[in-house]
Image: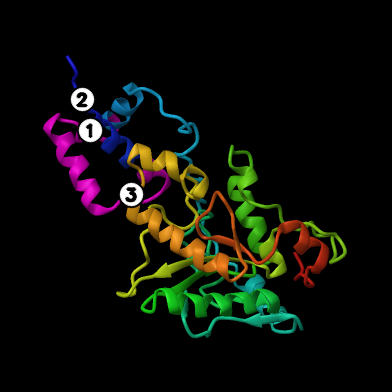
């Protein structure tokens, strides 16, 4: 006798994956909860036991990872203010905070990010290298033609070394340590071509706002570590019911517009785009002078 239906398995599995490593639409949560209540599975520990009792699914070895939040969250105001003061002086950089067609809302300027720290001291200012800024402006124009009522939302742009260090520390020693680039060592200078592409002002984390001003549903939130956070896992997630066609359509719109403007998408993150290939950036561009560590 089959105790649980395949539909219920998928609903419970989807809830657990997204509860620990992403987001779940309210309607899907209600549906899963209703089915679970019918079988007296209201307690989370029982939900987990049901998941473990199901057949294994491909690529499900790491999707539940969430970095441990700090016991004492910090706000790095001095470091971020020093960085922004320096960014204003970089001759090849441009502030994009007030561009028409974009809204800047940075999770790293709050405590609501995977590090648990307020990295940007509540300051939502965004900078890019002028070459990347030009491509962003091109993307704004393309989006206006393809989806006139949509806007871009910027989660992050140029990123300071202090912020990169904190993000790296949050995943160090976990299976996801390679998902976050290393910061530039304190002894390094602009001649050493390492570090996150955000450090060069040549990468951006970006999404879409729909005609109602709401974030277009991408199936997972910004900075999710789930295996289907980018294009790489989309087909598997679609087959497993973790993503739907509308969510993939939204991702494809973002990739299409950004790609047409000269950006390339990181295959594991729907939000991350580079203004040029990584090797090209590190060859052609210099790291700006970094604040003291």
Which residue is at the front of the view, 52 or 216? 216
Considering only vertical position in the picture, is 153 above or below 183?
Answer: below
Q: Earlier in the sequence, mark 3 or mark 1?
A: 1
What's the magenta bit mostly, secondary-structure-wise? Answer: helix
Specify whether residue 31 is painted magenta. yes
Q: Quadrant of the C terminus?
A: bottom right
Q: Secondary structure at mark 2?
A: loop
Which residue is at the front of the view, 269 or 43? 269
Q: Please tell me which residue is depicted at 58% across the width and 81% down the height of the picture.
A: 96
Give the colour scheme of this rendering.
rainbow
Q: CA distance from mark 2 to mark 1?
A: 6 Å
Residue 97 shown left or right of residue 19 in the figure:
right
Q: Position of residue 285 (x, y in %)?
A: 79, 69
Q: Position of residue 27 (x, y in %)?
A: 21, 51
Q: Which residues are magenta?
A: 17-45
Of badges 3 and 1, the one in the foreground is 3
Q: Position of residue 234 (x, y in %)?
A: 45, 45
Q: Secondary structure at mark 3?
A: loop
Picture disc at residue 4: 2
Q: Which residue is mark 3?
A: 244
Of badges 3 and 2, the one in the foreground is 3
Q: Please tell me which residue is depicted at 36% across the width and 22% down the height of the picture.
A: 55
Please rate how many residues cluster around mark 3, counting C-alpha atoms within 10 Å: few if below 14, some from 14 to 19, many from 20.
Answer: some
- Are the two marked residues, 2 and 1, in contact with CB atoms closer than 8 angstroms? yes
Picture disc at residue 8: 1
């Amino acid at each position: 006798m089959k105790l649980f239906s395949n539909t219920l398995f998928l609903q419970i599995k989807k809830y657990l994956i997204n509860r620990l490593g992403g987001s779940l639409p309210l309607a899907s949560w209600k549906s899963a909860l209703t089915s679970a209540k019918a079988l007296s599975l209201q307690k989370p520990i029982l939900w987990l036991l049901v998941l473990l009792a199901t057949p294994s699914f491909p690529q499900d070895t790491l999707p539940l990872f969430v970095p441990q939040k700090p016991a004492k969250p910090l706000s790095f105001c001095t470091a971020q203010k020093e960085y922004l003061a320096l960014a204003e002086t970089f001759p090849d950089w441009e502030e994009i905070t007030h561009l028409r067609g974009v809204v800047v809302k940075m999770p790293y300027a709050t405590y609501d990010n995977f590090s648990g720290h307020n990295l940007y001291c509540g300051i939502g200012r965004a900078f890019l290298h002028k070459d990347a800024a030009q491509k962003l402006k091109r993307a704004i124009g393309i989006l206006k033609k393809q989806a006139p009522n949509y806007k871009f939302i910027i989660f992050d742009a140029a990123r300071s070394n202090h912020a990169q260090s904190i993000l790296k520390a949050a995943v160090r020693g976990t299976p996801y340590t390679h998902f976050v680039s290393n910061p530039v060592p304190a002894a390094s200078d602009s001649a050493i071509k390492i570090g996150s592409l955000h450090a060069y002002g040549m990468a951006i984390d970006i999404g879409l706002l729909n005609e109602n001003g709401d974030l277009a549903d991408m199936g997972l939130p910004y900075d999710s570590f789930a295996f289907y956070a980018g294009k790489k896992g989309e087909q598997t997630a679609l087959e497993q019911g973790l993503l739907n066609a509308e969510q993939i359509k939204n991702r494809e719109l973002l990739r299409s517009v950004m790609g047409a403007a000269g950006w390339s998408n990181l295959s594991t993150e729907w939000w991350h785009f580079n203004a040029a290939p990584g090797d090209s950036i590190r060859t052609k561009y210099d790291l700006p002078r970094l604040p003291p560590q």
